[in-house]
């Protein structure tokens, strides 16, 4: 969603959205997909609540439209805004229904509950909205619908509600966006291409929530304007204060709601604030009515604090209002979580590199236990499975930064032996088809061994010896990597075009000679002369 002058509630929703996308980048696929689904359902419930409140306010405005000119104008504006909102929300509902039109997304036992944990693919919208690097007709329709709503609302409101129009411009800007790597992307690519289906579903529900929120704020202002009298609450707005910037699942949300006056009469005479102990300068904030709007960088990843005071004049005397607020900065997502089922595998006999993290918890507060596992640095580990174990379970626990205790998780990996190496001759791997070499080249060739290209580890092997065979001649045992004198003499008795074999190649892992490698297959050579 866009930035701009947002309510505390909107800021919290956007923050939760960013937190869960960051978790997605930290290899917590199923849990995060489910978490996105939970956010989507909460937004849906919020939308239902907004629709009920907006309907009541709209009916009241229509009922009072004949009282005076101000009431008539308020009712006409409300009806037009409601029509624009409904049209756009209905379009988004159709798009969401398309995303959910898949039998596997419906729980078999209830026929109702959406199975968010399987909504991890992005191909549907990738193909529907943005194909072959270009926006499709359906994608352009998505942008057109957003522009139609935005332009209609801006034309309707004009200059009468600058705060709301500023939010509309920010929330519904369909222009190109520069991502964190400096690459310019169109709106569809930046927001939907490559994202899991449940993420796109939640984004659309969030857009609906933005539309409902804007309509609610507009209708509320119209209603207040209609019945404004001295001493009313026109210049007040709800303020929510929380003890922390993010909450864990299962914890208690302790937000406190109050009224705050926002007109120019409450503008402070002096601002004395610090961000993480550093003074906030005059060019780093501005006034919007009685509000102080900060324009400072979000800083590095982690918690930050804004402290100090706002100084107000009352009866000619200065009164200090202390400020002690906190917020948290997280990384933008730059990678999707892609996993292959049943591919949790580590190999015996090699050092398997692993990265182990717990979302929202620093490396120093994470404890990891597993046979053969050792920490290298930070989140980097090495797994060396013990001999004879068919699988290994890694247990992870972490201390929550807010003092809420510990959380734990685990993952099980199958332990597999190193696959059989392949023989090599003159540095080329044997692929099942006989080498064709001149006799002199074979005499000087070195016999080697290595892993197939499918094996991802760099595993140097040392050849100790092999058996050399020529049809009709006694086999020759060779120590080392080249034919010895006896083998060369045997080779001299082979006829042109005949096939000789190198068998029982003996090799060891250079860095782990005690590991019992699987048997290496034989190689054949056709003599060219």
Image (cartoon, rainbow, N blue to C red):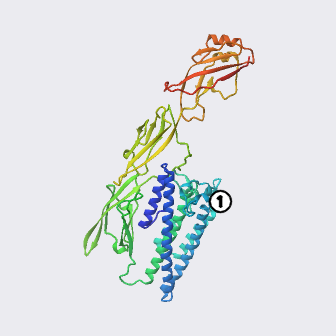
Label 1: few (<14), some (14–19) or many (≥20) C-alpha neighbours in 10 Å: some
Q: Decide if residue 305 is on the left or right side of residue 4.
A: left
Q: Residue furthest left?
A: 317
Q: Residue at x 49, y 26 (%)?
A: 512
At 49% across and 25% down in the image, what residue appears?
514
Residue 485 point in image, percent of width and height: 62, 10
Residue 518 percent location from the top left of the image: 57, 28
Question: From the viewer's perspective, is residue 465 above or below residue 338?
Answer: above
For mark 1, what is the residue? Answer: 136
* Residue at figure coordinates x 51%, y 25% from the top left: 510
Q: Position of residue 293 (x, y in %)?
A: 39, 65
Q: Quadrant of the C terminus?
A: top right
Q: Nearer the viewer, residue 113 or 119?
A: 113
Q: Is residue 150 above or below residue 479?
A: below
In the rendered structure, the answer to whether residue 143 lies left or right of residue 6 reads: right
Expressed as whole percent of the image width and height from the top left, the position of residue 414 reads 52, 39
**Foreground: 353 or 63?**
353
Q: Which quarter of the figure has residue 314?
A: bottom left
Q: Quadrant of residue 305?
A: bottom left
The answer, for residue 1, to whether it is visible in the render is no
Find numbered disc 1 in the image and state the secondary structure of the residue it sits on.
loop
Q: Is residue 165 left or right of residue 139?
A: left
| In the image, farthest residue toward the bottom | 67
Residue 33 appearing in the image: yes
Question: Which is more toward the observer, 246 or 518?
Answer: 518
Number of on-image labels = 1
């Amino acid at each position: 969603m866009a930035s701009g002058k947002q309510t505390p509630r909107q800021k919290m929703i956007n923050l939760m959205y960013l937190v869960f996308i960051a978790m997605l980048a930290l290899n917590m696929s199923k849990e995060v997909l489910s978490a996105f689904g939970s956010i989507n359902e909460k937004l849906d419930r919020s939308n239902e609540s907004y629709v009920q409140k907006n309907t009541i306010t709209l009916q009241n405005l229509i009922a009072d439209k004949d009282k005076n000119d101000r009431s008539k104008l308020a009712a006409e504006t409300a009806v037009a805004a409601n029509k624009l909102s409904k049209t756009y929300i209905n379009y988004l509902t159709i798009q969401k229904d398309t995303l959910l039109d898949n039998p596997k997304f419906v729980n078999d036992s209830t026929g109702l509950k959406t199975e968010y944990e399987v909504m991890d693919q992005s191909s549907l919208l990738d193909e529907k909205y943005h194909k072959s690097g270009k926006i499709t007709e359906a994608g352009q329709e998505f942008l057109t619908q957003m522009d139609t709503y935005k332009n209609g609302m801006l034309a309707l409101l004009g200059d009468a509600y600058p705060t709301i129009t500023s939010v509309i411009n920010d929330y519904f800007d369909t222009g190109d966006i520069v991502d964190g790597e400096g690459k310019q992307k169109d709106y569809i690519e930046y927001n939907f291409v490559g994202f899991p289906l449940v993420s796109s579903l939640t984004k659309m529900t969030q857009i609906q929530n933005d539309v409902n929120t804007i309509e609610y704020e507009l209708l509320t202002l119209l209603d207040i304007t209609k019945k404004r009298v001295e001493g009313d609450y026109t210049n007040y707005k709800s303020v929510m204060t929380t003890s922390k910037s993010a909450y864990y699942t299962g914890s208690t949300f302790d937000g406190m709601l109050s009224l705050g006056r926002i007109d120019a009469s409450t503008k402070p005479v002096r601002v004395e604030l610090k961000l993480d102990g550093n003074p906030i300068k005059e060019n780093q904030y501005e006034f919007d009515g009685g509000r102080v709007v900060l324009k400072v960088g979000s800083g590095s990843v982690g918690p930050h604090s804004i402290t100090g005071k706002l100084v107000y004049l009352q009866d000619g005397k200065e009164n200090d209002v202390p400020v002690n607020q906190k917020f948290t900065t997280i990384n933008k997502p730059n990678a999707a979580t892609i996993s292959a089922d049943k591919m949790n595998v580590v190999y015996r006999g090699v050092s398997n590199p692993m990265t182990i993290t717990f979302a929202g918890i620093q490396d120093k507060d994470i404890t990891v236990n597993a046979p053969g596992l050792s920490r290298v640095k930070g989140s980097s580990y090495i797994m060396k499975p013990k001999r004879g174990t068919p699988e290994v379970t890694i247990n992870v626990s972490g201390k929550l930064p807010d003092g809420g205790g510990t959380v734990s998780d685990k993952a099980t990996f199958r332990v597999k032996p190193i696959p059989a190496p392949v023989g090599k001759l003159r540095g080329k791997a044997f692929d099942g088809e006989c080498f064709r070499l001149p006799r002199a080249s074979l005499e000087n060739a070195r016999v080697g061994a290595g892993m197939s290209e499918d094996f991802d580890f760099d595993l140097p092997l040392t050849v100790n010896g092999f058996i050399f065979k020529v049809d009709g001649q006694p086999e020759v045992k060779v120590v080392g990597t080249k034919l010895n004198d006896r083998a060369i003499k045997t080779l001299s008795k082979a006829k042109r075009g005949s096939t000789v074999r190198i068998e029982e190649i003996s090799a060891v892992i250079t860095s782990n000679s005690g590991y019992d490698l699987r048997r290496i297959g034989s190689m054949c050579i056709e003599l060219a002369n």
